[in-house]
Image (cartoon, coloured by chain):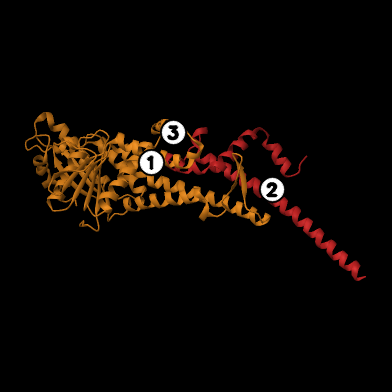
Chain colours: A red, B orange
């Protein structure tokens, strides 16, 4: 009896761990998308003048530019996939 | 307020092209130098004529033109070159490993970017305040400015930049907050692959180079903003002629400067026609002038006014400037 209870408990804790993992994975996925979009917006604001957006005074852009490797990469990747953003969003929310 | 070594003051002479900014600024600087104050007069106008007014050749280095009086004509080409050089050095420092060849060649094109001229001028103003004001060399720094439009853009730059910096810092913190959330959930460091290299990405403001650079920019702009908007330190003297167009332009400048927190204290009415017995042909002109003066006094209420007559001879050299001093006694 005791053994069955122990197995049940360990099964339950295993199940909750799996559940936690799934939720954590999903949360990371959502936050990552949000983060990526914020990084993209940051890069767009700094380099806005290239696409006709108002941008900060040139010196601010130039002073930040050397540190923006990551943001530029994100911006480039997003711009490559811009024609299928709807599909990407649908994938994120498991809409098939 | 009375200037002294520990508390230097700054005066900007501003107005439409041709109203007599340089002459009045030079006369004021001479007046203060004659009172014993260490005075630096700096021409920021790309089309300099401070040297012509003082009747001597000037350069980028201060030249003693009278007892206690030094004059500088800012070299615009050199100023923009220096500004771009500093930027390119910074870019080279960081991208050096990528072996970007002939970087200067590409950076050079930046001189044509909108805003570079204003930023370079602001950098020069900062450099002069740091070198002569903060280092206790000057009691008074007098800036003879370019015509109104460019000057206003230079003066607005710290305010505009601070607005941008604040917004960018807000956005940056939002980015860092999300990166931190991810590391907290995964329990791992935040790493990405850039150019085939695994790089650790900063998650805290204290280690984020972009946030740190924004903080640097903020403190630099805050410093100059506080100096320019402190009425105990910086005041504007608007130079106008007794005609409606310069008065209206000066009024717009005054409104704009007030909006960004810069204090205008003096209105200098230059080239006022004073004729004892007015000939018939001049009567309409004198009437117009009186109307314009009346309008100026209405627009610039509570400001200190001073009038300089239309002089029979164009003032050139120290001796001629001494004759103007009597008219600007109330400008301190």
Which disc, if any, is residue A61? none
- Establish if B317 lies above or below B218: above
- The alpha-carbon separation of the residues under discs 2 and 1 comes to 41 Å
Q: Is residue B203 left or right of residue B324?
A: right
Q: Residues within 10 Å of mark 3 (few under 14, many from 20)?
A: some
**What residue is rendered at 16% in x and 32% in y?**
B284
Q: Residues within 10 Å of mark 1 (few under 14, many from 20)?
A: few
Chain containing mark 3: B
Q: Is residue A92 left or right of residue B43?
A: right
What residue is disc 3 on?
B103
Whether labels 2 and 1 belong to a single chain: the reply is no
Q: Residues within 10 Å of mark 2 (few under 14, many from 20)?
A: some
Q: Is residue A12 left or right of residue B47?
A: right
Chain containing mark 2: A
Could one spot residue B232 in this view of the protein? yes
Q: Quadrant of the N terminus of chain A?
A: bottom right
**What residue is rendered at 74% in x and 54% in y?**
A23
Secondary structure beneath dot 1 equals helix
What residue is disc 1 on?
B86
Could one spot residue B302 in this view of the protein? no
Q: Which numbered disc, 1 or 3, marks the residue that appears first in the sequence?
A: 1
What residue is disc 2 on?
A29
């Amino acid at each position: 009896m005791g053994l069955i209870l122990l197995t049940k408990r360990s099964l339950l804790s295993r199940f909750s761990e799996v559940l936690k993992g799934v939720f954590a994975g999903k949360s990371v996925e959502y936050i990552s998308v949000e983060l990526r979009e914020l990084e993209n917006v940051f890069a767009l604001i700094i380099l806005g003048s290239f696409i006709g957006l108002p941008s900060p005074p040139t010196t601010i852009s130039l002073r930040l530019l050397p540190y923006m490797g990551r943001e530029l990469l994100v911006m480039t990747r997003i711009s490559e996939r811009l024609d299928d953003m709807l599909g990407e969003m649908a994938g994120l929310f498991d809409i098939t | 307020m009375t200037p002294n070594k520990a508390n230097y003051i700054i005066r900007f002479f501003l107005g439409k092209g041709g109203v007599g900014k340089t002459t009045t600024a030079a006369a004021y600087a001479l007046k203060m130098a004659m009172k014993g104050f260490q005075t630096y007069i700096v021409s920021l106008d790309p089309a300099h004529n401070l040297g012509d007014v003082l009747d001597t050749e000037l350069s980028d280095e201060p030249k003693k033109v009278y007892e206690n009086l030094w004059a500088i004509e800012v070299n615009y080409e050199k100023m923009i070159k220096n500004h771009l050089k500093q930027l390119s050095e910074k870019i080279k420092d960081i991208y050096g490993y990528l072996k970007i060849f002939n970087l200067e060649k590409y950076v050079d094109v930046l001189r044509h970017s909108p805003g570079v001229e204003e930023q370079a001028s602001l950098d020069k103003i900062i450099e002069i305040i740091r070198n002569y004001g903060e280092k206790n060399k000057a009691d008074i720094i007098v800036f003879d400015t370019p015509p109104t439009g460019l000057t206003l853009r230079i003066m607005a730059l710290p305010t505009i930049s601070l607005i941008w910096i604040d917004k960018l810092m807000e956005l940056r913190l939002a980015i860092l907050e999300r990166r931190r959330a991810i590391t907290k959930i995964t329990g791992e460091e935040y790493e990405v692959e850039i150019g085939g290299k695994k790089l650790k990405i900063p998650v805290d403001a204290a280690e984020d180079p972009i946030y740190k650079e924004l903080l640097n920019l903020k403190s630099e702009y805050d410093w100059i903003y506080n100096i320019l908007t402190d009425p105990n330190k910086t005041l504007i003297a608007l130079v106008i002629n007794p005609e409606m167009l310069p008065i209206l332009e000066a009024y717009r400048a005054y409104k704009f400067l007030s909006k960004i927190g810069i204090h205008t204290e003096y209105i200098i009415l230059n080239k006022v026609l004073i004729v004892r017995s007015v000939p018939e042909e001049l009567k309409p002109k004198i009437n117009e002038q009186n109307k314009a003066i009346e309008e100026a006094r209405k627009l610039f209420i509570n400001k200190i006014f001073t009038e300089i007559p239309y002089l029979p001879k164009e003032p050139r050299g120290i001796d001629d400037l001494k004759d103007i001093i009597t008219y600007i006694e109330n400008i301190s």
